[in-house]
Amino acid sequence: MKTKALLAALTLAVPAAYAAAPPAYVSTAVQSSARPAEDTARDAARHPAELVAFAGIKPGNTVADIMPGGGYFTRIFSGVVGASGHVYAVVPSEFVQKNPKATDKVTALAAEKNFSNVSVVTVPAAGIATDKPLDVAWTSDNYHDITGYFGKDQALAMDKAVFKALKPGGVFIVIDHAAQAGSGDSATTTLHRIDPALVLEQAKAAGFTLEGKSQVLANPADTHDKKVFDETIRGHTDQFVFKFRKPK
């Protein structure tokens, strides 16, 4: 029964409101000249405008970009929330221990005048917290790393910390490369993929409800058995996009 319920949730339709064109403030942030060319070159594959609109991020919001990498989405969030909002680039301390330079790019980003509403936070994944309650927490293509390198329990602990950091009614967006159904966490370090059902199960265990699922990064041609860095699929993997809500 549990498996059937999870499968039913995975087929949840995308709400009609998210199919509309992105709001102007999202389009403006994506088209900003402050974004580097290396970022904008990836927009066709990453669909940032559609994803940010799906998340519901808007001016004045407080957003956490968890495991932001080079700041691809951090820059866009900064432009969307504007001067009245704030973006936390959250780098788990476990990743800094593995790679001491893990915060370098987002630290340099936050020092730029165009992104003065960005600050960098380094805390354990299980202790994610920010100075202000969050409207949105976001992690893109990283959930499998937390699970693979530090274990399912650590990923669940992160979900619980995110739940606590969000305002009532806040949103948690999880995007990742899909692994084969039923594979759990077995492909997290080998293929850098994760079973969507595992992410859904853990988010629900942390207290979240699944509000929607976007198909904008779906690729039915992906067989889910290749490493995401394989040149035949890189940049075009089948990715799931979950929108979780913290109940009010």
Image (cartoon, rainbow, N blue to C red):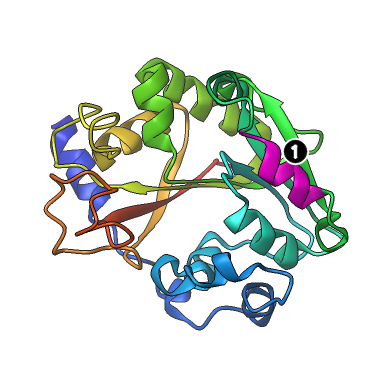
Q: Residue 164 at x, y = what percent? A: 63, 29
Task: Give the main secondary structure, helix, strand or loop, of the magenta stretch.
Answer: helix
The stretch of residues the image draws in magenta is: 102-110
Which quadrant of the structure image shows residue 233? bottom left
Q: Is mark 1 on a helix, strand or loop?
A: strand
Answer whether residue 199 is magenta in the image: no
Asked whether 214 or 95 is in front, the reply is 95
The vertical placement of 117 against 3, above or below, is: below
Q: Where is residue 191 in the image (x, y as percent from the top left)?
A: 24, 38
Q: Is residue 204 visible?
A: no
Q: Residues within 10 Å of mark 1 (few under 14, many from 20)?
A: many
Q: Is residue 104 left or right of residue 217?
A: right
Residue 156 spot, x, y in % from top left: 43, 23
| Residue drawn 75% across the image and 42% down it | 107
Which corner quadrant holds the C terminus?
top right
Residue at the (29%, 29%) spot, across then down: 189
Q: Which of 99 and 133 is in front in this view?
A: 99
Q: Is residue 136 left or right of residue 145?
A: right
In this rendered view, identify the residue nearer to me: 140 or 130.
Answer: 140
Locate the N terminus and report the quarter of the image it occupies.
Answer: top left
The answer to whether residue 206 is left or right of residue 103 is left
Q: In this view, does 98 lie above or below 42?
A: above
Mark yes or no: residue 210 visible: yes
What is the tally of numbered marks visible in this picture?
1
The location of residue 50, given as percent across then percent down, is 48, 71
Q: Which residue is drawn at 58% across and 18% down?
A: 97
Residue at 42% over, 36% down: 143
Residue 108 among magenta residues: yes
Q: Name the residue under label 1.
A: 120
Side of 141 where 185 appears, left or right:
left
The kind of residue on which mark 1 rests is Val
